[in-house]
Image (cartoon, helix red, strand yellow):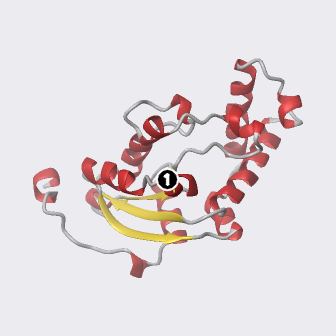
């Protein structure tokens, strides 16, 4: 496949939709030169979100470790706030909260296409922890949420959007959220100037 055809999945989560940020998300991706080739609004079931996340032990432990670091740096006792100090167990809790939140209301699913789409998408959205996200990214500009606030309220971090982690993850996620008939081919007027 030609590098111009790289694709990534972007989900505007229920919090982003409720805050009226769908247009801003599209604007940031299109301004960067990525082409919108699929879009739909839907309410995902918990079963659908479980297939979307498909966490590995490594990912769960990574989420748990991030949370432990944040709690410890804030002087909080993980066992008191989370009931455990096991990164894997904390990751499982967070993942369950993710399932619940992503299916809690309507969201907007989109596929963007262009060179290095997944890597570019991650730069546009910023760090998964909004309080660490750079100003100029979607999360850095529109959220200040953190694991501490999420853990205190037994919910995931509200970070507005999901962006595929890499090209392999993007392929799997796009197939999960879109049929081939829901993805479109067309030429943007600036493609020749930007990529040829």
The furthest residue to the left: 193
The furthest residue to the bottom: 181
Locate residue 11 relative to residue 148 in the image: left or right.
Answer: left
- Specify the quadrant that holds the C terminus: bottom left
Residue 85 appearing in the image: no
- Residue at image location 39% in from the left, 52% down from the top: 25
Locate residue 158 relative to residue 194 in the image: left or right.
Answer: right
Near mark 1 (Cα within 10 A), the count class, few <14, some 14-19 or many ≥20, is: many
- Report the number of discs: 1
- Residue at image location 79% in from the left, 40% down from the top: 90
- Residue at image location 37% in from the left, 74% down from the top: 183
**Label 1 secondary element:** loop
Q: Nearer the viewer, residue 189 or 88?
A: 189
Q: Nearer the viewer, residue 64 or 20?
A: 20
Q: Quadrant of residue 7?
A: bottom left
Q: Quadrant of residue 104?
A: bottom right
Residue 177 appearing in the image: yes
Q: Position of residue 29 (x, y in %)?
A: 33, 51
- Specify the quadrant that holds the N terminus: bottom left
Q: Is 59 drawn above or below residue 192 in the view shown?
A: above
Q: Which residue corresponds to mark 1?
A: 164
Q: Position of residue 60 (x, y in %)?
A: 71, 45
Q: Position of residue 9 (x, y in %)?
A: 45, 59
Locate residue 62 relative to residue 8 in the image: left or right.
Answer: right
Locate residue 144 relative to residue 179 in the image: left or right.
Answer: right
Q: Position of residue 120 (x, y in %)?
A: 36, 45
- Residue at image location 84% in from the left, 24% down from the top: 77
Q: Nearer the viewer, residue 160 or 185?
A: 160
């Amino acid at each position: 496949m030609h590098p111009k055809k790289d694709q990534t999945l972007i989900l505007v989560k229920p919090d982003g939709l409720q805050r009226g940020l769908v247009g801003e998300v599209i604007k940031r991706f299109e301004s960067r030169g990525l082409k919108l080739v699929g879009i739909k609004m839907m309410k995902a079931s918990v079963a659908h979100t479980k297939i979307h996340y498909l966490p590995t032990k490594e990912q769960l432990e990574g989420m748990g470790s991030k949370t432990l670091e944040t709690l410890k740096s804030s002087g909080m006792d993980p066992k008191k706030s989370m009931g455990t100090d096991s990164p894997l167990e904390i990751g499982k809790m967070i993942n369950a909260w993710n399932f619940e939140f992503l299916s809690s209301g309507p969201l907007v699913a989109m596929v963007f296409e262009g060179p290095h789409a997944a890597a570019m998408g991650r730069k546009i959205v910023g760090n998964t922890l909004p309080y660490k996200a750079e100003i100029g990214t979607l999360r850095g500009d529109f959220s200040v949420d953190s694991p501490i606030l999420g853990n205190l309220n037994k919910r995931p971090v509200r970070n507005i959007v999901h962006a595929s982690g890499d090209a392999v993850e993007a392929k799997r996620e796009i197939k999960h959220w879109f049929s081939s008939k829901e993805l479109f081919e067309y030429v943007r007027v600036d493609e020749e100037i930007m990529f040829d």
